[in-house]
Image (spheres, rainbow, N blue to C red):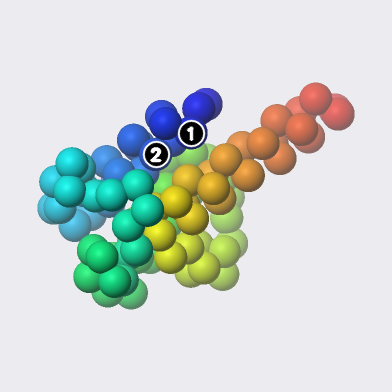
Amino acid sequence: MEAAAIRSKIKEIISNVTNIPVEEIGDRASFRDDLDLDSLSLLEIGVDVDYAFKLGLPEEQIQEIQTVQDTVDLVLKCLGERLAHAEVA
């Protein structure tokens, strides 16, 4: 899955949780500073992203994401690791 598709899906999830229009969510937007999200919204976004991409992330890792780009990077990393493990097996 390409970064653009992942970013689009993440923005869709953020929009569904926050009711912020997708086009108003910048690629590098900070969840707290730019989008003014609270801890509960951040957790919901993290869980929804985890579920959408079937990552199986621990809650501590979900709580570390600060921006849209952090989220994209984390998903890419996890999907890359999963692919690498599948190739080894």
Depth check, front residue: 76 or 46: 76
CA gap between label 2 and label 1 equals 6 Å
* Other residues around mark 1 within 10 Å, as few (<14) / some (14–19) / many (≥20): few
Judge whether 75 appears above or below 57 on screen. Answer: above
Q: Looking at this rendering, what residue extends furthest in the bottom direction?
A: 39
From this viewpoint, is residue 37 visible?
no
Residue 82 in picture, x, y percent from top left: 69, 36
Residue underneath mark 1 = 3
Quadrant of the rendering where the C terminus is positioned: top right
Q: Residue at (35%, 37%) from the top-left corner?
A: 9
State if disc 1 and disc 2 touch (CB < 8 Å).
yes
On screen, residue 44 versus residue 79, left or right, reads left
What amino acid is found at the position of numbered circle 1 in the picture? Ala
Q: Secondary structure at mark 1?
A: helix
Residue 73 in picture, x, y percent from top left: 54, 48
What amino acid is found at the position of numbered circle 2 in the picture? Arg
From this viewpoint, is residue 56 visible?
yes
Q: Residue at (34%, 35%) from the top-left corner?
A: 8
On screen, residue 28 versus residue 24, left or right, reads right
Q: Residue at (80%, 25%) from the top-left corner?
A: 87
Residue 23 in picture, x, y percent from top left: 18, 41
Q: Residue at (30%, 44%) from the top-left corner?
A: 11
On screen, residue 80 versus residue 25, left or right, reads right
* Other residues around mark 2 within 10 Å, as few (<14) / some (14–19) / many (≥20): some
Q: Secondary structure at mark 2?
A: helix
Q: Identify the disc placed on residue 7.
A: 2
Judge whether 83 appears above or below 23 on screen. Answer: above
| Picture quadrant where residue 80 is located | top right
